[in-house]
Image: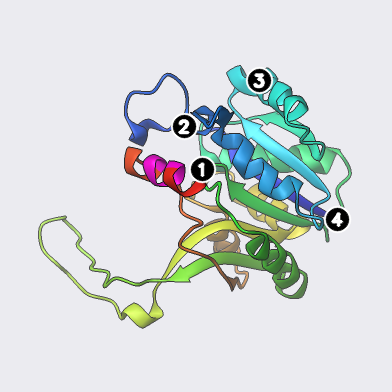
Amino acid sequence: MNIALIVAAGSGTRMGNLDCPKQFLLVNNKPILYYTVNAFETNPNIDKILIVTNKAYIEQVKNWSDQYQLTKVNYVVEGGSTRQESVFNGLKTLKNAGINENDVILIHDCARPLISQDIINNNIEACKKHDAVDTAIAASDTIMKSLNGDKIDSIPNRKELYQSQTPQTFKFGLIYKAHENAMNNEATDDCMLVKMAGNDIYLVNGSKLNFKITTQEDLELFKSIIK
């Protein structure tokens, strides 16, 4: 079974003053959440979808799922105070539902609504082979490291650098154990937890269109692409 776990519990503070979290902003009269979830809904290889969201929006998300006929949305779960906690809440729900340890879990940021079908399919196939994979694109710009934000300390070799995206995809047993073992260690994403547990992670090609809506400029770009 292949299950998409959509993380939609963020507050979107980097977008500035908003009336609601960015994932619920309406674009062409539909929430950004819709575009993200629909990409997985329409993929024939996805069996179920779980959405982790803010407590205040759980009923709204359920209503949208009915309104837009997102029939694969089987679970809507309350998020936590951190991304890590939100994902683990979703994983615990799946464990209680009897998910198999070898089922494939695609963990995806709701704020990446332009994910392609190829990326979804390639994540599933690569995870079946490697157990843990991350969507990424090669760094196109030179990356500089600065410890104090004032001067350059080092310039890593660009050929060795990649920009991580999502989905980050794992066999269920592996990602659940990584979260369980790291409950007292906060990480910025799930691959970090899996790597901390000593597991190898393989790369799946992402896309520049699979960008994350973080700023107002990102939102305007998304609007222009889907217009």
Choose the circle earlier in sequence order: 2 or 4.
4
Contact between labelled residues 1 and 2, with CB atoms less than 8 Å apart = yes
Q: CA distance from mark 3 to mark 2?
A: 14 Å
- Depth order, front residue of 5/92: 5
Question: Which residues make up the magenta segment?
Answer: 219-223
Position above or below: 169 against 113: below
Q: Nearer the viewer, mark 3 or mark 4?
A: 3
- Depth order, front residue of 55/113: 113
* Residue that badge 2 annotates: 22
Contact between labelled residues 1 and 4, with CB atoms less than 8 Å apart = no
Q: Residue 93 lies in what quarter of the image?
A: top right
* Residue that badge 3 annotates: 60
Which residue type carries mark 2? Answer: Lys
* Number of numbered tags placed on the structure image: 4
Which residue type carries mark 4? Answer: Met
Which residue type carries mark 1? Answer: Ala
* Residue that badge 1 annotates: 111
Q: Residue at x 42, y 45 (%)?
A: 224
Q: CA distance from mark 4 to mark 1?
A: 24 Å
Residue 51 image offset from top left, x and y in percent: 68, 36
Residue 1 disc label = 4
Residue 213 visible, this orientation:
no
* Prevailing secondary structure class for the magenta stretch in the rendered image: helix
Q: CA distance from mark 2 to mark 1?
A: 8 Å
